[in-house]
Image (cartoon, grey):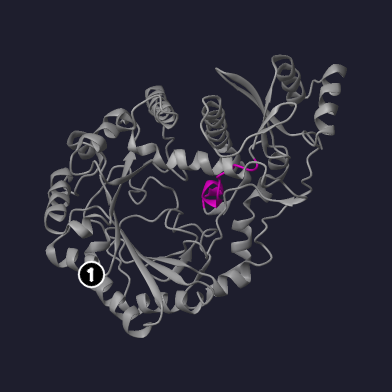
Amino acid sequence: MAVVIKTFSTPGGLYVYDRGANAILSVSSAEHLALQRIEAGIADNNDCELLKRYIDQGYLQDSRIKEIEHPATTYMPFYLENCMNQLTLQVTQDCNLRCNYCIYGGMYGTQRIHSKKTMSFEMMKKCVDFIIARSRGVDEICVSFYGGESFLEIDKIKACVSYIKDKYKGRSVRYTTTTNGTLFNDEIIRFLDENGFATVISIDGPRDLHNKNRVYANGRGSYDDIMENVQYIKKHYPKYYEKLSFTTVIAPGIDFSCVSDFFSAEEILSDSNVNYSTVNKYGASNDLEYNDLYYTTRNYQMMKSLFAKIGLYSIKKTSKFFATSLADIEILYANLSKTSVLEKSHPGGPCLPGAMRPFADVDGNLFPCERVSEGSIAMNIGHVDTGFDLKKIEDILNVGRLTEAECKSCWCFNFCGLCAAACDRNGKLCGEERLRHCYSEKYSSLDKLVAICLLLENKHDFNKFKDGEGKNYG
């Protein structure tokens, strides 16, 4: 199989990413042109001479991948029986809001819709027993409570926490919950505070933008109620406030810059942890189109964060949204040259389904996480009464087999973030569906490679730097 590379450039340099060595090489203009021809499969004799020089240095080798297989495949059964570290409980399928982009709003194919179904206390206990029995190999587990709106069933959450404390006194257990922030009261806040809950609250920016999508069933916006609750918590429960984090969804048509500025300018939120996401695109009945303004604004904000990283811009003027992105760039750089593809390899993307962050619906059905479709046959990986379906889990773990030929020749193999959710078409795993999402993964990965090179060109200290015929960034 031919060498797998990706040529790219920045305003300050010309580069090639070598998948086999998992390294970025800085190259000359003539070399860059030759490598572009090699990449396109139209190399001439002179290009082959260049290729040979790099091969002699240990780079640009023919791809070693012969088979797509996730490295966790063989030990997954043991891991599922001994090393579960988290379980998310769907305490209710009901919600007091009707957000326009909600995955339970009826526009996501096989996904369920809002209902009044709740998880019984008996089922909660079964779920707790299920993870405790399968977590002997970990020091601490996490039990998460999810909806719908989880606080609609706060009494059951309280009873579940009491059950864990009474029956499993020797276990270290963390608790998390996600809420729309409208139902806080003193009783709920004290309970969450006393039990160390990490709490994620959804706010989509300033009032006018938030209220475009996050509304009650009667259409009234929820912004004022949420902000009043957050202000109350900060004033009366400052220690619990420190455990709050916020998440925002940038929907199509929403001004990215305006939302970003809100979280920096709004005094009560300015010191908080904030993450953003876009509307879930997997399984949507309609294509979700983000306009050029969104991408231009996002890229501009990211560039300011990179400038701040090298001391050319004030960190106070950058968007809080990109703290995670910058950390991802650092991690990607740290892993360059440390890992390389083997004869049996799998694209990045799949977590360890059933072990990392499994999700139990109100009836006790198990899914890889809370973000997949609950109506999908392929995503249902078992039940708390009967255990895991190992065949389905292996299929989900090895979704790269669906697109084996394409993955074997793809430069983005090491960075791919496509999991099984990107392959789900009407409840079945589908290679064609997976390929529909390849472009966005390649675009995102190339952005990170470019960012690494920009930082290095401006003397950012990644604490690692080597020279070869080209400069090996990794």
Q: Residue at x 74, y 19 (%)?
A: 31
Identity, as a three-letter code, of the amino acid under mark 1: Glu
Above-or-below relation of 314 to 326: above
* Residue with the most extreme bottom position: 167
Q: Residue at x 17, y 67 (%)?
A: 190
Q: Residue at x 44, y 70 (%)?
A: 140
Give the tally of numbered discs. 1
Q: Is residue 433 visible?
A: no
Percent of width and height locating residue 209? 23, 34
In the structure shown, which secondary structural element does the residue marked by tag 1 occupy? helix
Percent of width and height locating residue 200? 30, 54
Q: Which residue is drawn at 12% across and 49% down?
A: 228
Above-or-below relation of 414 to 79: above
Percent of width and height locating residue 139? 47, 72
Residue nearest the observer in this picture, 89 or 307: 307
Q: In which quarter of the image is residue 361?
A: bottom left
- Location of the N terminus by quadrant is top right
Above-or-below relation of 223 to 310: below
* Residue with the most extreme top position: 30
Residue topped by disc 1: 194
Q: Quadrant of residue 433?
A: top right
Residue nearest the observer in this picture, 299 or 27: 27
Residue nearest the observer in this picture, 128 or 466: 466
Q: Does 421 lie within the magenta span?
A: yes
Q: For mark 1, does the 10 Å Cα neighbourhood hold few (<14), some (14 to 19), or many (20 or more) residues?
A: few
Q: Quadrant of residue 311?
A: top left
- Please report the bounds of the magenta region as a residue range: 413-426
Residue nearest the observer in this picture, 29 or 379: 29
Percent of width and height locating residue 111? 42, 53
Q: Can residue 140 be seen in this view?
A: yes
On screen, residue 450 versus residue 409, left or right, reads left
Q: Does 187 lie within the magenta span?
A: no
